[in-house]
Image (cartoon, rainbow, N blue to C red):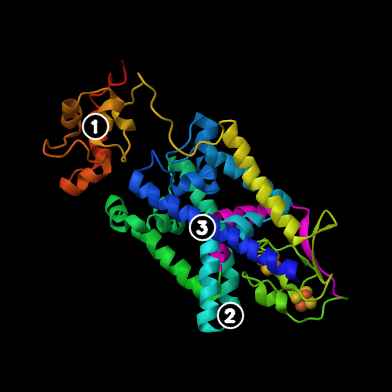
Amino acid sequence: MQKNKFTRGLRITILLGLLTYITYEGYLHQVLGGGKAPSTHALCPFGALESLYTLLFTGSFIQKIYSGTVVLLILTVIIAILFRRSFCGLLCPFGALQELFGKIGRRILKKQFIMPAFIDKPLRYLKYLILLLTVGMAWYYGTLWMAPYDPYSAYTHLSAFTDTIEEDPLAIIGFLVLVVTLAGSFIYDRFFCKYLCPVGALYGIIGRLSPTKIERNADLCVNCKKCNKACPVNIDVEKSLKITSAECINCNECVLVCPKKGALEIKTAGKKIQPFALLLIVIGLFFGTIFIAQATGNYEILPSKIEEGQTITISEIKGYYTIEEAAVATGMSLQEIYEKLGIPKNISKNTQMKAISKEVDGFILDEAKSKASGDNTNVDEP
Ligand code: SF4
Ligand code: SF4
């Protein structure tokens, strides 16, 4: 029992650690820009799935996605094949945020609420529709189509709320979905995981192939229902003999709270595996692979640095560049870059490209780049 308590504490500590990391990275991304701190999209495996079509047919990634994102997708798919939705239950920072709100909600409301079945059942299918829609649209348009509606992205943009909405008014939808997710998790726990998460839906489908399952021994079970109470996604563990549902996020809380030895066990290919060992294997696989990918130069989560002597085209100028950095990167003089992009002379050369619109009414970076690209055919020639 002591070991179970420790394992539960360790899982929560890892999740909160990852949530803290993502929150800090999100803040840095806003302050330093995408060239110095990665975006949430680069750190979320789903971004690589959205980029898959472009990668297979053009050999390049869609904006904000890099080789490290692909490593994360492959790695989490392998985890799903071996250990079902363990990424959701043991490693996902957005899952951690929801669980945190769920725990606070249970403390304050002093009750665990369960969504009525007639709403819950149809809503569970919504995440599969979102998976199809978001991947389809991303493949069709070759962009992170879901980004403005994504509550995870909205969470990491909280420190730049007004700027984000000014840049893309549709981003307000992502912030609203974030509010719904947090309020829903406060009352029902893991709201986004249960009803909306496309990547959870993907792991759930893949996890059907997994040899790992939780099994209940009806002869040893005393029907105390502690497992049901502990389950953040409301699976009726006490009535099941095997948990094969794609809804199970493999947090193993049910196994860890079960008071009867042997009544509830995790089995991989028929062999019993302790929750603590499983947690260590998943963590080791996840961080070990990232470490190896990083050490071998296969884990990029930032755009490649512009080498000396190399130039980019105007259309490749990023929003986080200052005007001066854009001039150096394109190999132009400052005067040329001001003229080509139509930037008034009174704007400081240290202003970030994405911030110009705040000082110049009607300035839209993408439009300025497209207009300038028309007469920029030779700009990347040395
Ligand atoms: S917690 Fe264990 S003993 Fe209690 S109902 Fe669940 S499986 Fe049975
Ligand atoms: S069934 Fe058990 S492992 Fe699955 S989500 Fe519920 S508590 Fe976690």
Q: Earlier in the sequence, mark 2 or mark 1?
A: 2
Task: List x then y, in percent, for residue 79.
Answer: 68, 49
Q: Earlier in the sequence, mark 3 or mark 1?
A: 3
Which residue range is magenta in the image? 190-218
Question: Label 3 is placed on what type of residue?
Answer: Leu
At x 49% / y 30%, what residue is drawn?
A: 58
Label 1 secondary element: helix
Residue 254 appears in which quarter of the rendering? bottom right
Question: Label 2 is placed on what type of residue?
Answer: Gln
The span from disc 2 to disc 1 (Cα, nearest Å) is 56 Å
Residue 42 left/right relative to 264: left
Q: Earlier in the sequence, mark 2 or mark 3?
A: 3
The span from disc 2 to disc 3 (Cα, nearest Å) is 23 Å
Question: Label 1 is placed on what type of residue?
Answer: Glu
Residue at mark 3: 19
Q: Magenta segment: does it hold 208?
A: yes
Q: Magenta segment: does it hold 209?
A: yes
At x 66% / y 54%, what residue is drawn?
A: 205
List the single residue furthest toward the right: 219
Task: List x then y, in percent, for residue 156.
Answer: 42, 55
Kindly indicate whether the residue at mark 3 contacts the one at mark 2 (C-beta within 8 angstroms): no
Residue 281 left/right relative to 98: right
Residue at mark 1: 324
Quadrant of the drawing holding the N terminus: bottom right
Residue at mark 2: 112
Quadrant of the drawing holding the C terminus: top left
